[in-house]
Image (cartoon, rainbow, N blue to C red):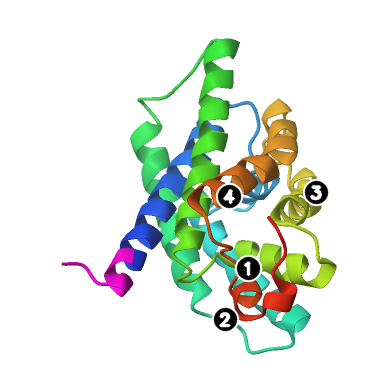
């Protein structure tokens, strides 16, 4: 029988695999991706390396940014999640390259929407395991703690910041990006509520900071 630790690790890996699939579907939709993924794709095209490689590099930088905001030691364990996510995105993109090439706008839109839902589901599942959040998701929790707002607000704020950065590197920004900014937070918020329990570790440790999400 699986113990609690094994169950959490399975949820953690499963969530990341689902999250990576969702990111790959939005990229393949060719309608624009989330601001963060748009930045990764833009860097991949303009500078080189794979999308997954930039996932890891940006995560490494964000670990130190999060450390400054929280005034604590860098959480290098989050690099493991970033590495698995980046690897997963590269593998899914390779597998979907010939399988998912939508031509009609309606099919592209379906691919995009399915990708957004899958991203929200995968993120909620892996965060629920409370194992090692990707640095960008850790930032989401930090903003939640600092502002007293919910995940929807934090996620949307982060999206807006990365949107500006994605423009700088000519990332794939389009209607899909707008939909992600508008719907990404609510979709994640929905799945977090559906799965249950606040995935924010600091909120769980301090009931005075346990905000409704």
Of pointers 2 and 3, the one earlier in the residue sequence: 2
- Considering every residue shown, the one lying at the far left of the view is 1
Residue at image mark 2: 75
Disc 1 secondary structure class: helix
Report helix, strand or loop for mark 3. helix
Nearer to me, 196 or 153: 196
Residue 169 locus on image (x, y percent): 74, 47
- Residue 164 x %, y %: 82, 49
Judge the density around disc 4: few (<14), some (14-19), many (≥20) Cα neighbours within 10 Å: few
Residue at the spot 71% in from the left edge and 53% down from the top edge: 155
Badge 3: few (under 14), some or many (20 or more) residues near its Cα, within 10 Å?
Answer: some
**Residue 6 included in the magenta stretch of the image:** yes
Magenta segment: 1-7
Q: Upstream in the sequence, badge 1 or badge 4?
A: 1
Q: Which residue is mark 4?
A: 193
Q: Are marks 2 and 1 in contact (CB under 8 Å)?
A: yes
- Quarter of the image with the C terminus is bottom right
Q: Which residue is mark 3?
A: 160
Q: Earlier in the sequence, mark 2 or mark 1?
A: 2
Q: Is residue 50 visible?
A: no
> Is 195 drawn above or below residue 8 in the view shown?
above
The residue at 44%/64% (across/down) is 129
């Amino acid at each position: 029988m699986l113990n609690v630790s094994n169950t959490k690790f399975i949820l953690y890996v499963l969530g990341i695999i689902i999250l990576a699939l969702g990111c790959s579907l939005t990229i393949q939709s060719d309608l624009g991706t989330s601001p963060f993924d748009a930045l990764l794709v833009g860097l991949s095209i303009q500078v080189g390396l794979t999308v997954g490689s930039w996932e890891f590099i940006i995560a490494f930088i964000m670990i130190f940014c999060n450390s400054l905001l929280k005034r604590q030691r860098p959480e290098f364990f989050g690099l493991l999640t970033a590495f698995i996510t980046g690897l997963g995105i590269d593998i899914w993109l390779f597998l979907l390259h010939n399988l998912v090439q939508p031509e009609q706008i309606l099919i592209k839109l379906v691919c995009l929407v399915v990708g957004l839902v899958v991203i929200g589901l995968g993120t909620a599942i892996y965060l629920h395991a409370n194992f090692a959040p990707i640095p960008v998701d850790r930032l989401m929790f930090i903003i939640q703690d600092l502002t007293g707002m919910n995940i929807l607000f934090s996620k949307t704020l982060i999206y807006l910041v990365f949107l500006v950065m994605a423009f700088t590197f000519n990332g794939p920004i389009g209607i899909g990006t707008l939909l992600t900014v508008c719907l990404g937070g609510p979709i994640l918020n929905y799945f977090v509520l559906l799965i249950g329990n606040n995935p924010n570790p600091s909120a769980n440790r301090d009931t005075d900071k346990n905000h409704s999400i």
